[in-house]
Every structure is written in C-alpha cells, then in structure tokens.
C-alpha cells in the first residue's frame, strides 16, 4: 500500500514565504521550481539547492475573477496574477488594490507573501504592490 500524498514540502515553502524567506529550488543549470520536488523538471538532475526569491516579482499576466470555485467564492472579485520571481513564476491573488480597476498591469512590481483565503482561512500566495509602485 502506498503512503498518503503529502503537501509537507509545499507547506514548509508557504511557511518560509510567510516569514519573508521564500525560496526556489534551483539546479546547476539554473532551472527553478517550487517544492515539493526531488528532481529538476527541466533536466532531471537531483542536485537542487534552495535559492532565495527576489524581493519583488514582475507581473507577466493577470485576470480579474468575478465567478470562482467554492473555495474562492468569498474572495470575489479578485485579481489573480502570475509574476516572475527570478528562477520561478508564482501564481497568487493580488491584495491591496481595487480589483475592478486596472490597478495591476503587466510589468508592475509585486511582493509575495502568504495570507488567508476569505472563505475558509486556508493559506494562499498573496501579492501586494511593491512600495516603489
């Protein structure tokens, strides 16, 4: 019988991000990924090191969500974004902005942290506009 699935590596990563110590797993060739991971998804090496995330990331795309699944319904409307943080891209909800306006654009700088989802209090990756914006 196989062991039950675990989010242990991801949960530890969320804790690190919440503490301001977010990191990516990076192989010698510079490919980045997020935990849990035992090998690089690009080249297959098992030589991965923890490298700190950049303090800010750049928005690559974003979308305003008005109709969400049950776990995110209490958060609507919200902006979800994908931001480049160096060797990895993070997906999260942008907080501290008006989701109805064009408050977030491609190229904007964001910081990443962990906050609670409105409906159930579970942790999620949250972005906030960088101080220099």
Image (cartoon, rainbow, N blue to C red):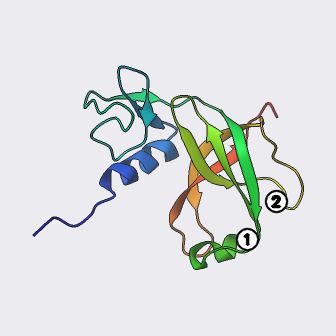
Q: Residue furthest top?
A: 28
Decide: is 129 above or below 132: below
Residue 99: x and y, percent?
82, 59
Residue under circle 2?
Answer: 99
- Above or below residue 103? Residue 72 is below
Q: Which mark is residue 26?
A: none
Query: Which residue extends farthest left?
Result: 1
Residue at disc 1, secondary structure: loop
Q: Position of residue 43 (x, y in %)?
A: 34, 30
127 horizontally vs 23: left or right:
right
Residue for point 71% across, 40% down: 59
Name the residue at 9% across, 70% down: 1
Considering only order in the chain, which callout, 1 or 2, is on the residue closer to the N terminus?
A: 1
The residues tagged by marks 2 and 1 sit, at their Cα atoms, a distance apart of 9 Å
Side of 56 where 120 appears, left or right: left
User: Where is residue 27 drawn, in percent x and y?
Assistant: 36, 26
């Amino acid at each position: 019988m196989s062991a039950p699935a675990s989010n242990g590596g991801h949960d530890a990563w969320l804790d690190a991000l919440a503490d301001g110590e977010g990191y990516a797993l990076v192989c010698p060739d510079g490919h980045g990924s997020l935990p849990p991971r035992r090998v690089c998804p690009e080249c297959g090496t098992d030589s991965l090191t923890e490298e700190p995330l950049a303090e800010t990331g750049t928005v690559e795309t974003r979308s305003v969500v008005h109709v969400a699944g049950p776990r995110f319904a209490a958060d609507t409307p919200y902006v979800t974004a994908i931001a480049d943080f160096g060797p990895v891209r993070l997906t999260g909800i942008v907080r501290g902005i008006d989701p109805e306006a064009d408050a977030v654009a491609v190229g904007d700088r964001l910081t990443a942290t962990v906050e609670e989802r409105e409906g159930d209090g579970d942790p999620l990756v949250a972005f906030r506009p960088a101080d220099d914006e």
